[in-house]
Image (cartoon, coloured by chain):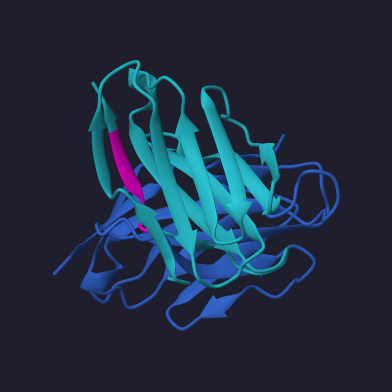
Chain colours: A blue, B cyan
Amino acid sequence: AQTVTQSQPEMSVQEAETVTLSCTYDTSESDYYLFWYKQPPSRQMILVIRQEAYKQQNATENRFSVNFQKAAKSFSLKISDSQLGDAAMYFCAYRSGNAGGTSYGKLTFGQGTILTVHP
Amino acid sequence: DAGITQSPRHKVTETGTPVTLRCHQTENHRYMYWYRQDPGHGLRLIHYSYGVKDTDKGEVSDGYSVSRSKTEDFLLTLESATSSQTSVYFCATQEGYNSPLHFGNGTRLTVT
């Protein structure tokens, strides 16, 4: 079974600075997807960024980028120019790329990291 | 998001009572999921559906059952609620296998 670990329960950053959230995962599969989700106090789950394991290039979405290290099974999220609206719980998640069996689209989530942004 | 409505938004119930949570979607997505969120555990999959009347168990399915009689509705039932089922429950839908998941706004359930 796959596991996802976020070792930082809480992180903080000054507005306009850069912060990196860590995520490691364990899998024996070669085909999979990795995600970062943001959960603000409203409880809404918002997809921030997605990475396909077969792609060597790190995914980027505006101020959000990832450092995907497949051999090390590491998937960190970098937030540049942090804004007050970035304050939220962030979840790392894994999904198998195997379309067969019972895998379908189910996600395995990490424990979450609470990000505080100081003005 | 993706026209997902979860009801109720909040519920308090007593141990031993049956509880049904509803997820309604308007996007005609094939796949639907129920997750629970607990501190220190992130979100964990309870049950999922890959079509009408087609459902399967997730990693924390004990004490829960589901039904999907129509594409748009996915019901989660706690036959006899226990305090360990106090949690925030999220419904998610997915158009196709490689499509992104869309989440509802969650139901906070408290079992006293």
Q: Is residue A101 above or below residue A60?
A: above
At x 69%, y 60%, the residue is A33
Q: Decide if residue A79 is on the left or right side of residue A2.
A: left
Instruction: Find the magenta span and give its range.
Output: B105-109
Q: Is residue A105 above or below residue A117?
A: above
Q: Is residue A67 above or below residue B21?
A: below
At x 42%, y 59%, the residue is B104
- Residue A106 visible? The answer is yes
Q: Residue B12, percent across and down?
A: 23, 32
Outermost residue, front side: B69
Quadrant in the picture for residue B42:
top left
Q: Decide if residue A11 is on the left or right side of residue A105.
A: left
Q: Main secondary structure of the magenta part?
A: strand
At x 38%, y 22%, the residue is B81
Report the number of numbered marks. Answer: 0
- Residue A91 visible? The answer is no
